[in-house]
Image (spheres, coloured by chain):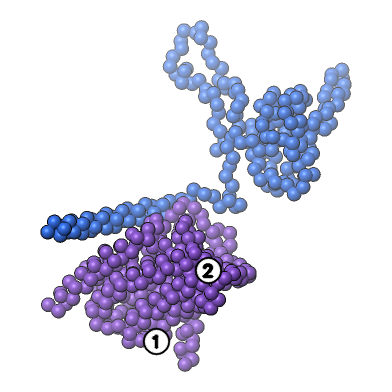
Amino acid sequence: MVDGEVEVSNMFRQIKVMWLGFLSLLIGMRVTMKNFFSPSVTLDYPNKKQPMTSNYRGMVDLKPEACVICYQCIKICPVAALYLSHNQTVVEGKKKLEITKFTYNAELCCFCGLCDEICPTDAMFMNKMYEVSAYSHEQILNIDLMEPDKYKHLDPNYNFSAEVTRNDENTVGKIIKPSVPVSAPATAAAPAPAAAETPKPIAQPPA
Amino acid sequence: MMDLLLKSGMIVTFIAVSAMFLVWWERKISALIQNRMGPMIVGWHGALQTPADMLKLLLKENIVPSGIDKLSWWLAPFFVVVPAVMAFVTIPFSDKFIVHDLNIGILFVTSITSVCVLGIFMAGWGSNNKYSLLGGMRSAAQIISYEVPLLLSVVLIVMEAGTLSMQEIIRAQEHGWFILKPNLALAFLIYLISATAEVNRVPFDIPEAESELGAGYHTEYTGMKFAMFFLAEYTNLVIISAVTATLFLGGWQGPILPPVVWFLLKVYGVVFLLMWVRWTLPRVRMDQMMGFAWKFLTPVALLNLLISGWLMVR
């Protein structure tokens, strides 16, 4: 008799388990349907590309007109991947420096970003290229940084002016001067609105 | 004779096209459910991905493993594909388009589709590989077990319609689909679960469980032979969906649209449901699956049959 009771209770337990399993299937199917109609989180890669983050370090790039030939990047480069030589001329009693050769050896480069950080005029920067494979050593051995189309042979979509604009907007790791001068503390009137107007230390990263 | 040949040709074309379409669909549905893109390169949203894959499989080298049982290894793909194609003989696509309306139609479909278990077991046995053998044995156990509740739910339909002919079963649903009756709705659920197990789909895909058995019975097959197993899998999916549409969802019947369109809509609706379940559930364990068939589905199907029969003769 006891056995019979156990069997009956087992049967009801079995039915309850099945019912709960069926309910959980319905809940799971609701979840999958919700995901079915939600947008994809991956990209159709070769056609659409993910924009790189603001602190991404791609290839070394140069804005030649901003360079002051201070040789800081040459000195700090831990692997000596950069080469710079210049020419000094005197024009109307004023010394004028001119870059004769500025090359970059991507084969030696360790992408540490020190040249980007040390550059006082932000002429040296690292662009956002990430498809940088080459077919031969020669293609990346002596890249002429003075040439605006220096990376066209690696990436046909490389756009120098776009990289420069992006770098000018990119402020990560740099001390930015506040755009509005902070009022002197001597003035007694230091109300709350003034504090609210203090500019943000870091500009918004490009969208 | 000419008519029969034409219809058979159309059926074979339909099988090939729908298998290609379903493979793409399955990949797309799984991708959408997992918030991915799926195939996107070949054709519109990757629509031509399956023909490309098919071409690749045709060009593959045919690798014959050593120590195989030659006869069963070579014959197995045919034993899997041919029954799947033969089952289409009695599938009614519309009131006129059916290759041959046998008076034992549903019996023919259920019996011919269970022949493919022989092919799967031959593949497992002939491959000289313990994973394949285990997969084939599991498949045999699974298909034979789930045949019981499947047939018990089909018997209920036969009792309700009073005929075994597919067209007559559809005509019996003129005034309301069979799924709308409570006892037949339960039979529908039992049929769908058993049919999912019959065609070795998730959550009952343990014969080809990747994590345990490699790919189960088709581990050792390459190229076109593998493609035939693949074709049979998706053809069987279409067959069980077509039988579900015929038995429970009123077949080709429906307003406005032509019957063929209604039939295909219902078939692909059921296919979508099965794919939806596939990408929702994980795989069950072997003992859970056998226990579910013998301890739960079969008693419930029997009880359903008993009560419905009593209500019919009362």
* x, y percent for residue A56: 61, 36
Q: Secondary structure at mark 2?
A: loop
Give the chain letter at badge 2.
Answer: B
Colour of the chain lettered A:
blue
* x, y percent for residue A186: 51, 7
Q: Is residue A156 above or below residue B232?
A: above
Between A160 and B50, the one lying in front of the other is B50
Quadrant housing residue A205:
top right
Label 1: few (<14), some (14–19) or many (≥20) C-alpha neighbours in 10 Å = some
- Letter of the purple chain: B
Residue at the (47%, 17%) spot, across then down: A194
- Give the tally of numbered discs: 2
Name the residue tied to disc 2: B128
Residue at the (26%, 64%) spot, across then down: B296
Residue A10 marker: none
Give the chain letter at badge 1.
Answer: B
* Left or right: residue A70 compared with residue B74: right
* x, y percent for residue B271: 40, 67
* x, y percent for residue B101: 36, 86
Residue B100 marker: 1
Front disc: 1 or 2: 2
Residue A16 seen by the camera: yes
Q: Secondary structure at mark 1?
A: loop
Quadrant housing residue A70:
top right
Residue at the (73%, 28%) spot, across then down: A77
* Left or right: residue B45 compared with residue B305: right
Q: Is residue B286 above or below residue A90?
A: below
